[in-house]
Amino acid sequence: MCSNPGATANYPVVVYNGFDVGTSTYTYTITSPADATYNFGYFLIDAETYTSWTLVGPIVNNIDQNWLSGSMFRTPTADSLYWRAVGNQEILANTYWQGIFKVIAPGTAPVMGSVLTKDGIDESSNITSLQVPGPVPEPTGFITLCGVMLGLPYWLRRGRT
């Protein structure tokens, strides 16, 4: 990931803060350390489901920095969600910074996935495994399966008599 294999790179750290069921909101905190090796200006979440999204942030000191945000088609059932710093919004290397990013995704549930932080160059990419928006288990399928399992002994007994 680093152009010099012997060098140690310090990337922004992504932390998944949780999912608010009431508002369908996923919250992430990104911290760029004071000794960050690269500029930071791009955050991407590989969501495991396709839905309508609202992306907020980054929020710094309770103020939305309004980075450019959107989604990219990844597969028929999944999207990549992104925030991108434009102009002077990019966080420079060797600068401490912390921002909160929010995804509002109705009809989803947290699943393991991946997030990516980077500058604008490939060498600065850093992938982390975290919870991301995913498909909601279908309750009717689960209820049907439970009903079949509960009725199975009755049907087996009935067939023997």
Image: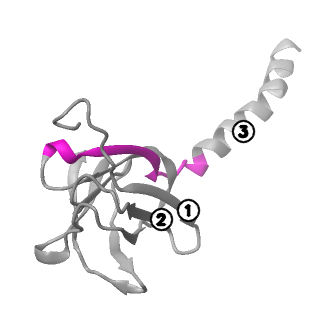
Asked whether the beta carbons under mark 2 and mark 1 sit within 8 Å of each other, the answer is: yes
Question: Going 38% across and 78% down the picture, which residue do you hit?
Answer: 59
Residue identifier under label 3: 146
Q: Give the range drawn in magenta.
A: 122-140
In the image, what residue type sits under mark 1?
Gly
Q: In terms of secondary structure, where does tag 1 sit? A: strand
Query: Relative to 69, is 35 on the left or the right?
Result: right
How much space separates mark 1 and mark 3, taking CA atoms?
30 Å
Quarter in which the N terminus is drawn: top left
Q: Please state the total of marks drawn on the protein image.
A: 3
Query: Relative to 78, is 151 on the left or the right?
Result: right
Q: 10 Å neighbourhood of mark 2: few (<14), some, or many (≥20)? A: many
Q: Is 136 above or below relative to 25?
A: above
Residue identifier under label 2: 26
Question: Going 50% across and 58% down the picture, which residue do you hit?
Answer: 16
Closer to the camera in the image, 56 or 119: 119
Q: Is 15 above or below relative to 101?
A: above
Question: Going 84% across and 21% down the picture, which residue do you hit?
Answer: 158
Q: In terms of secondary structure, where does tag 2 sit? A: strand
Residue identifier under label 1: 18
Closer to the camera in the image, 51 or 141: 51
Q: Quadrant of residue 88?
A: bottom left
